[in-house]
Image (cartoon, rainbow, N blue to C red):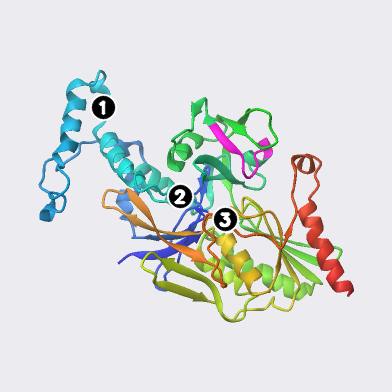
Amino acid sequence: MRNIFSKSMDGEKIRKHPAKTVARIFLILVLLGLSFSAGLVFANRNGIIADLAKKESALTGQVIGKYQKNAGDRLSKDVDFNLFWQVWDLLHKDFVKKDKLNEKELFYGAIHGMVAAAGDPYTVFMNPKVAAEFDSDLAGTFEGIGAEIGIKKGELTVIAPLPETPAEKAGLRAGDKIISINNESTVGMTVEQAVSKIRGPKNSQVVLKIFRQDFDQPKDFKIARDVITVKSVRTEARKDGIFVITITNFNNDTEQLFAKAASQAVEANPKGIILDLRNNPGGYLDTAIEVASRWIEDGIVVTEKFSDQKKNEYLARGLARLKDFPTIVLINQGSASASEIVAGALQDTGKAKLVGKQSFGKGSVQILENLSDGSSIKITVAQWLTPKGNNINEQGIKPDVEVDLTEKDYEAGKDPQLDKAVEMLTVKNSK
């Protein structure tokens, strides 16, 4: 049986099945990932294989069963699979550095290419080493620079730098285009390949060449890697009577921390709540529904639409302790997946107004299957729709009030988006 979970950046859906534990990542560049998250499904991995996959031995050994006949001759009608082995043999025979060829790297590379040919940036194959790193990200502690990345319009893009991480301190911004990593061009590079190049031990450095809309030309950002520990929920009871809840991602600890934050908000009895989802790349679907249900008492929170027109509707859970508090949700270009599910649900149901910039547009659902050797494959199987039927994928969520946060604002320590939210709640209360 497979464990189904959904995590939305990559992100991605991560649907925790009622009877099972789930796990999904969040490529934090160390990357939290692969996003985004709003949708993953996967099987429990054998502990021994997982341990082995974390070691450098993941790409050692030989490929077995190279010439076995395909079961059922499923490919024989249209494809002569011997072509694969012809190329395999020619490489081993004629390649100038054939003594350097690694059979497992060739084998995994072939599978990676096959999956990539589907043409979907969120449908990916992960070799055992990458799959193990993907799993470890769920724990919320890793070594890297602390940024979520994804593919947007064919370009490697920073989805969100995490608060108080090397990425944020170095000045990376949501929407930055990564032109090269340590002088290696990112053209044609997958998210997984980029992650493996950006990851690294604490105190080591990586150089990212970044292009930003405000830049005349790309600039190099030299970033020292560190241990990244993510606490996904923060709160602030402001002196002006407004309660701010910031969710950085929908991770393993989010439900418990948000439940505590909601209780604190009720106890504080504020004149309004600001839910800050900016630069939130996503996470678990169940957690997104849980958060939205603190405002939405009943009805649809999000719909999962499959290619065969089948739909799954996810309903509010009757936990709406915050429904009577005026609420503003902050979103920006780095808000993706699960954060878009929450923002779209609160907007469509009239429970909150949205302020900021249009969100990333990661509204697809992935299943994650763990394979027998410790590798994994993540496949897009559906898309997310808001309660009113709006497609999140590639379109994103449009704010009710658009407010930019410019480079000049950022450098000056100003936050016009937050200021606008405060203004709207203050005006509402004065009426």
Residue position marked by numbered label 1 in the rendering: 101
Pinpoint residue 34: horizontal percent, then vertical percent: 47, 49
The kind of residue tagged 1 is Leu
The kind of residue tagged 3 is Ala
Q: Which of marks 2 and 1 is in front?
A: 1
The kind of residue tagged 2 is Ser
Q: How far apart are marks 3 and 1 (CA)?
A: 39 Å
Q: What element carries label 3?
A: loop
Q: Is mark 1 on a helix, strand or loop?
A: loop
Q: Give the range drawn in magenta.
A: 169-179
Q: Distance between the residues labelled 2 and 1?
A: 29 Å
Residue displayed at 52% across by 60% down: 252
Residue position marked by numbered label 3 in the rendering: 336
Residue position marked by numbered label 2 in the rendering: 136
Quadrant of image for the N terminus = bottom left
Which mark is first along the chain, 2 or 3? 2
Residue displayed at 29% across by 40% down: 108
Tell me if mark 3 has few (under 14), some (14-19) or many (20+) residues whose alpha carbon lies within 10 angstroms of its own: many
The answer to whether the residues at label 3 and label 2 have Cβ atoms under 8 Å apart is no
Nearer to me, 1 or 368:
368
Residue displayed at 16% across by 50% down: 75
- Left or right of 274? Residue 142 is left
Tell me if mark 2 has few (under 14), some (14-19) or many (20+) residues whose alpha carbon lies within 10 angstroms of its own: some
Q: Name the quadrant containing residue 341.
A: bottom right
Q: What element carries label 2?
A: helix
Pinpoint residue 55: horizontal percent, then vertical percent: 36, 40
Question: Does 73 appear in magenta?
Answer: no
Q: Name the quadrant containing residue 410.
A: top right
Residue displayed at 81% across by 62% down: 422
Q: Name the quadrant containing residue 348.
A: bottom right
Q: What number of labels is visible?
A: 3
Which mark is first along the chain, 1 or 3? 1
